[in-house]
Amino acid sequence: MDHRSWANRTWYRFCRWICRVVSVLFFRFRFHGAEHFPAEGGALVLSNHQSFLDPAFVGQCHSRRMNFVARTTLSSSLIFRLVAGPLDPIPLDREGIGLAGIKEMLKRARRGEIIALFPEGTRTSDGELSELKPGFATICKRAKLPIIPAALDGAFQVWPRGKKFPRRGIVQMEYGRPILPDEYADWNDDRLVFEVTKRMGECLARAQRLRAMRERRRLLSRHDCVQRTS
């Protein structure tokens, strides 16, 4: 049960609806695999990190609320306080998720909420999956959460590092089969990181294939339109 205020819950749903509309209209956003989310209880969604838009893409794929982390330094921004502040993000300090952030994450997980993390730690520089930081393994082991691997493709192309503003494009999101607590109970951190990296890589490969197919169809459709008008 969500213990947040009615106003907070309403604002989250409104923001998710806005993100969905904008994503479909400007980025032709599509996703598969939302059926892997549990109907109730906590879970940890682990996605690759391609752009500043990633939380908006990840958070709109399921009706259940997702909890994201946000740097504490952003609280000095008026825009952040007005828009993201009411979304109740988990605090992230300069060195990563500090003790307060870990405690808050475990608290939300144990009351049955979904946590979304980008375990690469920073946005990719080439669109490919980077090495994962092992910190998420501690959260998984302590909270005993199902792990849902996920990956985006196309977000890097619409807003790569170094660009001030996004551009139109095609974005594809894929969620994979969850890794259940019973599966990884006896794994050490290295094995868990390896398996999550493998599953996220599989999700990324599917997302890349589907986005490439959609891009080809778009180009063929444009070519047909040009031929008909010429």
Image (cartoon, grey):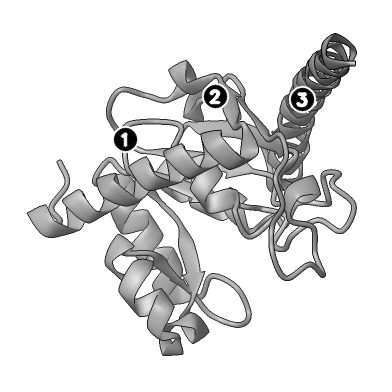
Kindly report the distance in space between the C-alpha atoms of the residues bearing marks 3 and 1: 25 Å
Foreground disc of the pair 2, 1: 1
Dividing the picture into quadrants, the one containing residue 95 is: bottom right
> Around disc 2, counting alpha carbons within 10 Å, would you say few (fewer than 14), some (14 to 19), or many (20 or more)?
many
Q: Position of residue 186 (x, y in %)?
A: 61, 32
Q: Position of residue 57 (x, y in %)?
A: 54, 43
List the single residue furthest toward the front.
Answer: 230
Q: Earlier in the sequence, mark 3 or mark 1?
A: 1
Q: Is residue 38 left or right of residue 230?
A: left
**Label 3 sits on what residue type?**
Arg
Q: Residue at x 32, y 43 (%)?
A: 65
For mark 2, what is the residue?
Answer: 178
Q: Is residue 202 visible?
A: yes
For mark 3, what is the residue?
Answer: 211
Q: Residue at x 90, y 16 (%)?
A: 230
Q: Is residue 171 left or right of residue 1?
A: right
Dividing the picture into quadrants, the one containing residue 76 is: bottom left
> Around disc 3, counting alpha carbons within 10 Å, would you say few (fewer than 14), some (14 to 19), or many (20 or more)?
many
